[in-house]
Image: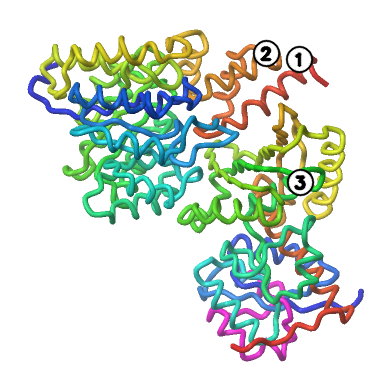
Amino acid sequence: MNLSGRKITVHDMCLRDGMHPKQHKITVEEMVRVARAMDDAGVPLIEVTHGDGLGGASVNYGFPAASDEEYLRAVCGSVKNTRVSALLLPGIGTVDHLQMAVDCGIHPIRVASHCIEADVAEQHIGMASQIEGLDTVGFLMMAHMIEPEELLAQMQLMESYGANCVYITDSAGYMLPDDVSACVALARRELKPSTELGFHGHHNLAMGVANSIAAVAAGANRIDGSMAGLGAGAGNTPLEVFIAVCDRMGIETGVDTFKAMDIAEDLITPMMDEQVRIDRDALTLGYAGVYSSFLLFAKRSAEKYKLSSRDILVELGRRKTVGGQEDMIEDLALDMARAAGTIK
Amino acid sequence: MGEKIKAAIIGPGNIGTDLLMKAMRSELIEPVWMVGVIADSPGLARAAELGLKTTAEGVDGMLPSMREDGVTICFDATSAAVHPENSRKVNAQGAVMIDLTPAAVGPYCIPPVNLHEAVAAKAMNVNMVSCGGQATIPLVAAVSRVQEVSYAEIVATVSSKSAGPGTRKNIDEFTRTTANGITRVGGAGEGKAIIIINPAEPPLIMRDTIHCLTVEAPDREAITRSIQKMMVEVQKYVPGYHLKNGPVFDGNRVSTYLEVAGLGDFLPRYAGNLDIMTAAGLRTGELYAQQILDGEFVPAASAA
């Protein structure tokens, strides 16, 4: 595979997806410190939002250390070349949040929906695409749940609403390189040539880097990852590793490889509450096709109701739960505990 | 059978048709008009077969004869965009408007919480909030009537098949209107609403989670009793309203997990989100009808 000379844009997720393992408690100061280091290393894009997107502050997902607005104002004001994106999940956040984020100075806005529900994002993508020069990205989550042809139809919807870039998002870290190649190649053939294509991986089956390279080979030009993999489940594609691989392969990211390693080792790893790694539960997410941010919720419910977190996760996969259904976890755990006779 | 109040349903889609099925069984409401905008719509044809007068000319098609036909209550099952105009027109003919769209022109009505107040206020337009609001706000109120709730949050999960194009195109209206209902009718200090659409097959039955944060430590016994009482109230018009788990007490958090199955009149049983809307709308209409029959309320035409 010769990808030498290909130019891609990497997008770091530490300050958004990384909020999940930090239970949304990354401080404004930590965010500013990380963002400055990313800027210095030449990372072109970073995302800053509650883990569940704008307006995610809730009992259901967790209350953050600061508001989206406080995070965004602080980070947007402290980077020179790096651009800051925000994530929005319609159903959780609204166009009011989107407008607030734009006022804070974000550049890409990324509007996410479950892979086959793109039409809930029409309102938000439509509004964003009307804002002069705003990089408007559609983000189709849990992409492993549908066939490439179905996924393409949803990508075309997002394109029709005004997205200039569409993402295939492997929220469960379930996809294998061939799956990624098939989805990306089909999308590249059928979408407008001007529409950019992205891939967002999770490392639950240790496929983050391999899947991202497969995506680039099939025609994607934006790749999400996070330094040291700080993200939900076993984390995102470890970005410093991906950058080193790109460097070896001659894929141009514009990021300084050693500086990326230093951010991962010296800044991000010390911030972790627990080592983000492929433990049994994170592996189960990838194996059973479960939304990665369910991980800590399943662990907590398992502990509280004396159940196996793997059993909870497998059942959540069997029930085809989608992103955002964190409230299902305690409900399910109560049912399982009752069935096991540990509660009345 | 006693006297009934004549009613019109505007919008012959899934909601309007389900409402019609329920209204045909009512002892207080007699549906006489179905109003649509598409001449060959199956909903209009179905209503005509059931003996209703129909028009495909929108509300304008009914206006010339609605007084003569005795229409005193109208149900709007169209969209927030056209609702205000519909309401203005039927109010001018002296009919009360029950709004099943998220337009929220009139005061909010969640039957087991504030139906009597809403009807006693003799409003000529009442709004049914949202499907998620109808399913969850009763339980927010069940907690807040026991003790102060500083914050309440609801998560409504509905099957893809039960979330129509109107809901999808304007999903923000759901989150905003429901959040407002949580504070105004539910009595919480602050409100948040989240909606999740799940495409699993077979379609999942509507499920709802209600989280309340109480100011003082929750009085477990009183809250549990209050929730159980409220369940019974809602079950009077939505028999498939089911407490799955909870209340779970965790510090100041009180969480309740529900499932809402519909009656399966026109809509499938899993679409409890739509059923609770039509059932709540009809229940509101029936209380208005009772008041009108009792001579307690005489709807008056407003200036057009």
Q: Residues within 10 Å of mark 1 (few under 14, many from 20)?
A: few
Q: Which image quadrant for residue A75?
A: top left
User: Which residue appears farthest toward the front when viewing the image?
Assistant: A29
Q: Is residue B70 magenta?
A: yes
Q: Nearer the viewer, mark 2 or mark 1?
A: 2
Q: Which image quadrant for residue B281?
A: bottom right
Q: Residues within 10 Å of mark 3 (few under 14, many from 20)?
A: many
Query: What subunit carries mark 3?
Result: B
Colour scheme shown: rainbow
Whether residue B222 sits left or right of residue A175 in the image: it is right
- Amino acid found under the numbered disc labelled 3: Ser
Residues marked 2 and 1 touching at CB (< 8 Å) = yes
Which residue is the site of mark 3?
B144
Q: Which quadrant holds the N terminus of chain A?
A: top left
- Amino acid found under the numbered disc labelled 2: Leu
Task: Using the image, determine if residue A325 lies above or below residue A208.
Answer: below
Q: Is residue A291 visible?
A: no
Residues marked 3 and 1 touching at CB (< 8 Å) = no
Residue at 17% across, 28% down: A8
Any mark on residue A307, and which?
2
Which residue is the site of mark 1?
A340
Query: What subunit carries mark 1?
Result: A
For the record, the magenta segment spans B46-74
